[in-house]
Amino acid sequence: MENKWILLVEDNADDEELTRRALKKNKILNELVVARDGAEALHYLLGSDNHDGHTVRNSPAVILLDLKLPKIDGLEVLRQLRENEKTACIPVVILTSSKEEQDIANAYKSGCNSYIRKPVDFLQFNDAVQSLGLYWLMLNEVPE
Amino acid sequence: MNTTHATDEAPHSAHRLSGDLQEIVRFYRDLLNSLSSYIAVLDSNGIIVESNKSWRNFAFDTSEETAVNSDVGKQYLDVCWACMCGVDKEWADDAARGIHTVLEKDLREFTLEYPLHSPLEQRWFVLRATLLKESSDHAVVVSHTDITDRKLAEIEINYARAYAESIVETLHEPLVVIMSPEMKVVSANDCFYETFKVTPEETIGNSIYDLGNRQWDIPRLKALLEDILPHDSVVKNYEVQHDFVNIGRRTFMLNARQFFTNKPDSQKILLAMDDITVRKQREADALQESKEDFHQLVENLSAGVVVHNSDSAIIFSNPMAAALLGLSNDQMRGKTAMDPSWCFLHVDGTTAPLEEYPINRVLSSGQPVTNQILGIKRPDLAEPLWVQCNAYPFTGPDGAIIHVVVTFTDISELKRAELEITRLNSKLEQRVIERTAQLERARNEMESFAYSVSHDLRAPLRSIDGFSLALLEEYGNALEDVGKDYLRRVRAATQRMAQLIDDMLKLSRITRAELIFEKVNLSHLAVTVSEELRSEEPERNVTFVIAPGVTAKGDPRLLKVVLDNLLGNAWKFTSNHAEARIEFGVTTVGAKTTYFVRDDGAGFNMKYAGKLFTTFQRLHTEQEFVGTGVGLALVQHVIQRHGGRVWAEGAVEQGATFWFTLGGGGGVRL
């Protein structure tokens, strides 16, 4: 369980807090690492030298990726992850406000594994996080 | 026939002759008896001394008395009357007188033709009394011969002649009969004398050429009568023009016919002369007039006309041709050199080679050239003059081209207008491109705006809702009920705002969407929507009445939005009723196919019908019926983009009917 950590790529602190809260309420206690923008996420995952020591870690069990991000947007992050052998197989769940057809289609084309629109109603969001944790952390298998 | 005569064997005779003489007499008597004429021989006193068989038969046939009276030995003059029985007394008297004259030897022969008509037939005879010889016994031979056939033929001929003459006389055409070869006039009709102002005396018997001081000595007439007619025997419409002494210059149309008489060296010629002088003059005048009219027309024509001969040389041109081509008459006729820079141009401005000139195209193909557009590059004009050319060949009887008429119409104005249109079009196109680009930019901006709204406006709402709930959950115990209620209101407001944002986005998406027109089965769509609604609230008692087979031309996705909203509204506004009926169907309103969705729910006050379709306008409170006021605005938007119209009828608590039409399929982009 310990090595199954979650990477949340989210620039909105409120959303980060709400996500943490939903995880906690659903008793998902896996480690949550937060990247504030696309560039940070890429650095973190692709092992840039000047980062703070996470470079040697194993891959996260799932990446929760927002689309609208500072510096490098979510779709670009996704594309680069898929291009890199090291990160190509990491499950990526798009967690975003947008419900635009175009965004959903592009996300899947770029290789996301799931697309979830953040509900405004926290109770619905809570349900979504619960399903998400159960599925990606408990049921889903990934190549080592 | 006569069968009872005892005297058949020998004519009666007062003398007895002997031997050979008797033989001779018998021979002559037999001869006499064989003749069909009635013959009697009288002595100098008029006593019948001899008669033949025909005489006796006739007398016997006439009557017994006649037979007795005309027998040998009777005085013929006495019986003349009786013999010529049935003849008028007058004729009989003439006959008696004539015979008497011969008997008296005053005349050697007397003949008289007389009629002898019976009610059954007309007959004619000729009486001939001939002094035989000086003897006293046989003085005169009297014969009556039947000439009925000849007489009838004569009558026939006379009638025919009178008929022919009356025709000739009534003709309004001078007519002469000439006897060839002397060409003497045999007869002429009244019209001939009137026309040529001559008298019969100076005409009949004279040579036609000699008439009136040889004024008829016309070479063409001579040729007709002496050369042509003997060959052809009939000549029609032979025109002769001549100056006549009495009547001046005349033109005659001659019709001649040669008659063959029984004299081979002498033929009769019937010559009819139709005076066509006036007619000819009228024709000439009319021709001259039409020539002048034509000349006037061509001279004043606004089109250039040039006539070429088969060698392509110009033989005629009108002033407009000279004006358009910019060439003098001499230049056109090749008498004066043309400026070498003069040439025809193709539509694209390149020089047209000689073989492309209309005249040469007609001469080489033999076919007309129609509507050829050519430019004329003239040394005296900066811009080429544009003309539309038509060229038409005129061919002779053998099909060879005699001349070619080429016409030029100035279309420079049209050409200028065309160029101007092309220029304006390209300008317009440029403007359309620019405007399209502007629209494209605006649309992109709108899209990114909508994206931002969708994404960014929702994030704070999530925070408000999420932390309100967190507050309730974590610190609910510290709050009084009123405080908890406030937090619930905060959360309800965020939900509502989220809904508003979503609806706005939907409206914007539909505004931006491209319409894809196809045949849509509205009945199927309505059934689908009704099933969706029913699955959301299966406990409700609602009857859907959906007309089957209703189709329309439109965008299926957007029409689904229309039915989603209209049927959804009907579902929503009947929710306060225990039972409801929702209907979808089609009808015709003012010849237009009109669809409708009807319910028996809450309805609305018609006073506010105008506000129904305005965005975010609502007729009910959120407490009565939830909603954002976007649905009907969406419906109207979609209908209008389809070129249709939507309107509503209703009354409070009596349900509502929403009507809509769809345009022909063209669609309107709003």
Image (spheres, coloured by chain):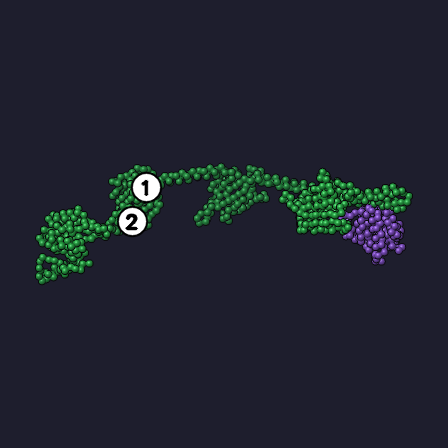
Chain colours: A purple, B green
Residue drawn at (51%, 40%) of the image: B304
Residue B17, position in %: x, y?
9, 60
Q: Which residue is mark 1?
A: B172
Q: Secondary structure at mark 1?
A: loop
Classify the position of the C terminus of chain B by image quarter: top right
Q: Residue furthest bottom?
A: B19
Q: Residue furthest right?
A: B478
Q: Nearer the viewer, residue A56 or B435?
A: B435
Q: Pointer 2 and pointer 1: residues touching (CB < 8 Å)?
A: no
B658 vs B221, left or right, is right
Mark 2 residue crowding within 10 angstroms, few (<14) / some (14–19) / many (20+): some
Residue A112, position in %: x, y?
80, 52
Mark 1 residue crowding within 10 angstroms, few (<14) / some (14–19) / many (20+): some
Residue type at numbered disc 1: His
Q: Nearer the viewer, residue B647 or B150?
A: B647
Q: Secondary structure at mark 2?
A: strand
Chain label for disc 2: B
> Which label sits on residue B258?
none
Q: Which residue is mark 2?
A: B259
Residue type at numbered disc 2: Phe
Residue B422, position in %: x, y?
62, 41
For residue B3, which quarter of the picture?
bottom left
Upstream in the sequence, badge 2 or badge 1? 1
